[in-house]
Image (cartoon, grey):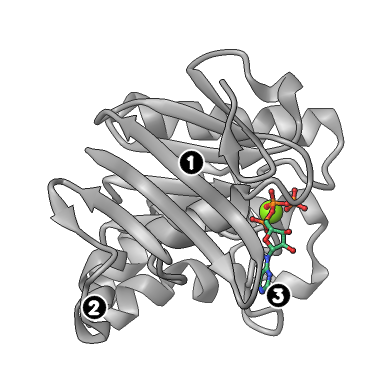
Amino acid sequence: MIQFISVYKTYGQGITSLSNINLAIKKGEFVFITGASGSGKTTLLKLLYCEERPTSGQILINRQAVDSLKISEIPYLRRRIGIIFQDFKLLSERTIFDNVAIPLEVLGLPREEIVKRVQDVLRKVRLHHRMEEKVSSLSGGEQQKVAVGRAIINDPMILLVDEPTGSLDSGSGDEIMEILRSVNARGTTIVVATHNRSLIKEGRAVVLEKGRIVS
Ligand SMILES: Nc1ncnc2c1ncn2[C@@H]1O[C@H](COP(=O)(O)OP(=O)(O)OP(=O)(O)O)[C@@H](O)[C@H]1O
Ligand SMILES: [Mg+2]
């Protein structure tokens, strides 16, 4: 489903973030990208989400080359990919409901359907009783769950997650991982970037070192 073929990413002059990446991820897999800070984990996710373009090489999603998509085609790809950013990127002055509803509003779905789907997803992440609260009043772990909700509201074929447990205590971290496992069990391919190797209890781990895959 996902293929990296001899992918390189260089920023400006000489900073090589990714070097000769060859990687295939099958539909329904749960894959961890791990490695030290600066090893290229976030860069790899950004290439999949077309937030950055590779300097050379090819990236295929369902046999479609996404490295050369036109700017106008990127939104269509992104409708099928959920992403949870390292810093969440939530609208902190809006409610939990509003944040999770955004991807559906972009699609112009009818209000009743939006309400129903947001409620369903918020039940999954156990925040349905708090949906009118502002994001700015939530803890880090709760905000992480809102970010999960927003990323899965469209039933994506691929879910990209950058440091799912970054600043969370181990209890909240376990809860997030449990939610990701249940999303994976319904068929979504999951790619998690993390420096925290203790999260890797199932699935496959790809280890990066200075932008290269070492195992
Ligand atoms: N926009 C950018 N411009 C220049 N260099 C960048 C840019 N983004 C990333 N880099 C460099 O690319 C390398 C890999 O960065 P990346 O963010 O992918 O690492 P990471 O593995 O996600 O690290 P962390 O665990 O700290 O999140 C680093 O050396 C970083 O400085
Ligand atoms: Mg990172």
Q: Where is residue 83 in the image (x, y as percent from the top left)?
A: 47, 57
Q: Which residue is drawn at 70% across and 84% down?
A: 93
- Residue 27 or residue 5, whichever sits in front: 5
Q: Where is residue 23 in the image (x, y as percent from the top left)?
A: 37, 34
Q: In this view, does 145 lie to the left or right of 50?
A: right
Q: Position of residue 195 (x, y in %)?
A: 74, 36
For the residues marked 3 and 2, what is the alpha-carbon distance in whole angstroms?
Answer: 23 Å
In this orientation, does residue 140 appear?
A: yes
User: Which quadrant holds residue 43?
Assistant: bottom right
| Mark closer to the chain start, 2 or 1 | 2
Mark 2 or mark 1, whichever is nearer to me: 2
Q: Name the residue under label 1.
A: 124
Q: Which residue is drawn at 76% across and 36% down?
A: 172
Q: Residue at x 21, y 86 (%)?
A: 72
Q: Name the residue under label 3.
A: 134
Q: Quadrant of the C terminus?
A: top right
Amino acid type shown at disc 2: Leu
Identify the element where label 3 is drawn. Answer: loop
In this orientation, does residue 150 appear?
A: no
Amino acid type shown at disc 3: Lys
